[in-house]
């Protein structure tokens, strides 16, 4: 028994984090979200070079394809390897056979020159024909000038902005500082601490596994008027898993809810990458409806067609060797971990 659906969309990913697994423990145990950023992610992203970025993207794209996810909305940061980084990620995704919508997350954490070079990378990539959005790390790591510059560039390029909003309690100023800048084509990741009544426009990206893992709280996305889409925040690209978790988490605070809201959030991904609707995933299970998928583990894709080409057949990628990708990614992970 098999069923066919369009390709799934991961609406918030960080492909660079694919090499983090097995990294050495940080110098001290992080005790809150701010120290998780400082002791884990901001040490990791500064150590990245283009070769590591390439193989983390290859591994992340492979894992997406193996999960029936044919489009990745990625938010990238590599402060010591900015120029060309979005090309490297786009090429890796194309090589595996999945679609990508990329952004470089600008920040003033490394001085205004870092933000300027990040903005330039977004502009260079999009003007040269890359499929992208303008990225902002988060309001709390950017000056007002950088926020305005990013919003202005996105308007000029006719694309949206991909930004973290109120993921932890330390970004409480974001609604005020981003008000007036956001538009409907913005992507607002997390919004855990965003007040229910707010003036931000755009699609809210809910990342249940990441929010649990970082102990930032439950975003309760059903409370917002904005559209909601599902992401992983870098913990793979298994969108059926993200759907299940989003449902269980909603259920944990409201036992009367069914899986339909979480299923709707999953399908909002097609508004962000509409071409994924034309992709075809043949699943190992039938029917692929919310109640069945919510309680059926280990449903897997058998065949995936992207843009008319078969990129997964009999559960195996057709364009790349998964063993080779995993071996190369392991080598690059060892280089990365040695730098930490
Ligand atoms: Zn994120």
Image (tube, helix red, strand yellow):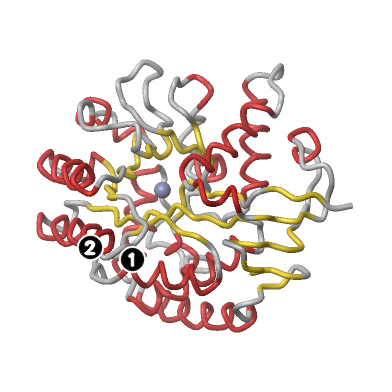
Relative depth, front residue between 277 and 111: 277
Q: Which residue lies furthest to the right in this view?
A: 1
Marker disc for residue 86: 1
100 on left or right of 158: right
Residue 190 image position (x, y, % from top left): 43, 37
Residue ID at (23%, 49%): 157
Q: Which residue lies furthest to the front in this view?
A: 308
Quadrant where the C terminus lies?
bottom left
Residue ID at (66%, 63%): 66
Q: Where is 250 relative to 269, above or below?
A: above
State which tag comes first along the sequence, 2 or 1.
1
Marker disc for residue 63: none
Q: Is mark 1 on a helix, strand or loop?
A: helix
31 on left or right of 171: right
Residue 173 image position (x, y, % from top left): 24, 29
Residue 298 image position (x, y, % from top left): 78, 53
Q: Does the residue labelled 1 lie within 8 Å of ligand 1?
A: no
Disc 2 and disc 1 in contact, CB within 8 angstroms: yes
Residue ID at (68%, 39%): 244
Q: Name the residue under label 2.
A: 121
Q: What element carries label 2?
A: helix
Q: Where is 105 relative to 27, above or below?
A: above
Query: Mark 2: few, some, or many residues within 10 Å (few <14, many ≥20)?
Result: many
Q: Quadrant of residue 243?
A: top right
Q: Is mark 2 within 8 Å of ligand 1?
A: no
């Amino acid at each position: 028994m098999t069923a066919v659906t369009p390709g799934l969309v991961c609406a918030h990913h960080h492909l660079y984090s694919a090499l983090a697994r097995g990294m050495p423990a940080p110098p001290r145990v992080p005790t809150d979200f701010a120290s998780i950023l400082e002791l884990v992610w901001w040490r990791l992203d500064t150590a990245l070079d283009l070769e590591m970025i390439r193989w983390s993207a290859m591994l992340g794209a492979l894992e997406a394809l193996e999960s029936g996810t044919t489009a990745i909305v990625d938010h990238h940061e590599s402060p010591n390897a900015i120029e060309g980084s979005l090309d490297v990620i786009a090429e890796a995704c194309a090589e595996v056979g999945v679609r990508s919508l990329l952004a470089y997350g600008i920040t003033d954490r490394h001085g205004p020159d870092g933000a300027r070079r990040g903005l330039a990378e977004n502009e260079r990539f999009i003007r040269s024909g890359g499929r992208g959005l303008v990225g902002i790390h988060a309001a709390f790591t950017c000056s007002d000038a950088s926020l305005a510059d990013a919003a202005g560039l996105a308007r000029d390029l006719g694309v949206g902005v991909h930004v973290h909003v109120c993921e932890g309690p330390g970004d409480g100023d974001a609604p005020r500082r981003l008000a007036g800048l956001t538009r409907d084509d913005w992507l607002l990741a997390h919004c855990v601490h965003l007040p229910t009544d707010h003036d931000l426009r755009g699609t809210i990206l809910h990342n249940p596994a990441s929010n649990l893992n970082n102990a930032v709280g439950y975003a309760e996305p059903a409370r917002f008027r904005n559209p909601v889409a599902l992401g992983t925040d870098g913990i793979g690209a298994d969108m059926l898993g993200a759907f299940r978790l989003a449902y269980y988490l909603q259920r944990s605070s409201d036992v009367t809810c069914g899986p339909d809201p979480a299923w709707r959030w999953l399908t909002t991904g097609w508004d962000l990458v509409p071409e994924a609707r034309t992709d075809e995933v043949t699943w190992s299970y039938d029917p692929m409806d919310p109640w069945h998928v919510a309680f059926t583990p280990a449903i897997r894709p058998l065949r995936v067609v992207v843009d008319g080409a078969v990129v997964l057949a009999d559960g195996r990628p057709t364009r790349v060797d998964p063993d080779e990708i995993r071996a190369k990614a392991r080598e690059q992970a060892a280089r990365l971990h040695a730098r930490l």
